[in-house]
């Protein structure tokens, strides 16, 4: 999987903000969708505090690595998935985190089947709270998953 392409896709979806802000769920966030955690040095800083490009890049690199590791943990067939599916799943993991992504039980089962059922995985992505909350991003990822299914058919 091309990590640079993955980073570009996620940054396009998340945007880049060089200060601390409150996300739609009122969580302090900075950079490229990085929800601040108590161990982050910025955690106690006020909303509006400027954050350097270097710090944003470091947080983003770390967050992408975490998303990849989350996918490897959730998907036992990770190594057998094609690169497009890996990028789709990493994008979802970046946005939702391991706990929420792991609740997509039927999608996971569809991808763990042999051969993987990409259309059913897309159906399960579509029939989710995630899609209703972030329809633009979700619909793009769902369309890409369906395209994988069409190419494999």
Image (tube, rainbow, N blue to C red):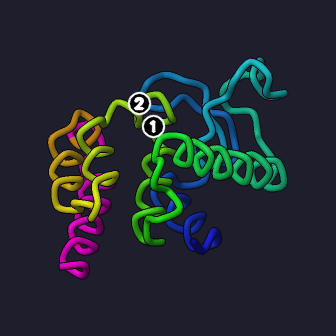
Q: Give the range drawn in magenta.
A: 132-153
**Mark 2 lies on residue:** 100
Position of 83 relative to 67 (above/below)? below
Which numbered disc covers residue 21?
none
Q: Distance between the residues labelled 2 and 1?
A: 6 Å
Front residue of 94 and 54: 94
Of all residues shown, which one is farthest toward the front? Answer: 114
Q: Magenta segment, principal secondary structure?
A: helix
Q: In this view, does 67 lie to the left or right of 127?
A: right
Q: Give coordinates of residue 147: x percent, y percent.
A: 24, 74
User: In what element is the residue under mark 2?
Assistant: helix
Q: Do the residues labelled 2 and 1 touch (CB within 8 Å)?
A: yes
For disc 2, the neighbor class at 10 Å (few under 14, some 14 to 19, many from 20) is few
Front position in the image: 83 or 153: 153
Q: Say what secondary structure mark 1 lies in.
A: helix
Q: Residues within 10 Å of mark 1 (few under 14, many from 20)?
A: some
Name the spot of residue 58 as percent of width and height, x first: 80, 51
Which sits in the foreground, 71 or 7? 71
Quarter occupied by the N terminus: bottom right
Query: What residue lies at 75% left-to-right and 22% top-to-bottom?
Result: 43
Which picture quadrant has residue 117? bottom left
Asked where in the image residue 7 lies, by quadrant, the reply is: bottom right
Q: Position of residue 113 (x, y in %)?
A: 28, 54
Whether 116 is drawn above or below 108: the answer is below
Residue at screen point 47% across, 28% down: 99
Q: Residue at x 22, y 71 (%)?
A: 149
**Which residue: 45% across, 37% down?**
96
Q: Which of 80 and 85 is in front in this view?
A: 80
Tell me the residue that label 1 is attached to.
Answer: 96
Residue 146 vertical placement versus 130 (above, below)? below
The quarter of the rendered structure image containing the C terminus is bottom left
Residue 46, percent from left and from top: 72, 22
């Amino acid at each position: 999987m091309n990590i640079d392409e993955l980073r570009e896709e996620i940054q396009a979806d998340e945007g880049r903000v060089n200060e601390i802000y409150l996300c739609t769920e009122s969580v302090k966030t900075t950079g490229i969708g990085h929800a601040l955690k108590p161990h982050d040095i910025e955690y106690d800083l006020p909303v509006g505090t400027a954050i350097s490009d270097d710090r944003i890049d470091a947080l983003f690199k770390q967050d992408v690595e975490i998303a990849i590791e989350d996918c490897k943990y959730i998907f036992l067939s990770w190594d057998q998935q094609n690169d497009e599916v890996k990028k789709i799943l990493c994008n979802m993991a970046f946005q939702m985190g391991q706990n929420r992504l792991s609740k997509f039980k039927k999608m996971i089962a569809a991808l763990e089947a042999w051969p993987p059922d990409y259309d059913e995985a897309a159906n399960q992505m579509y029939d989710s709270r995630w899609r209703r909350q972030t329809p633009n991003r979700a619909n793009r990822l769902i369309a890409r998953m369906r395209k994988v299914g069409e190419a494999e058919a």
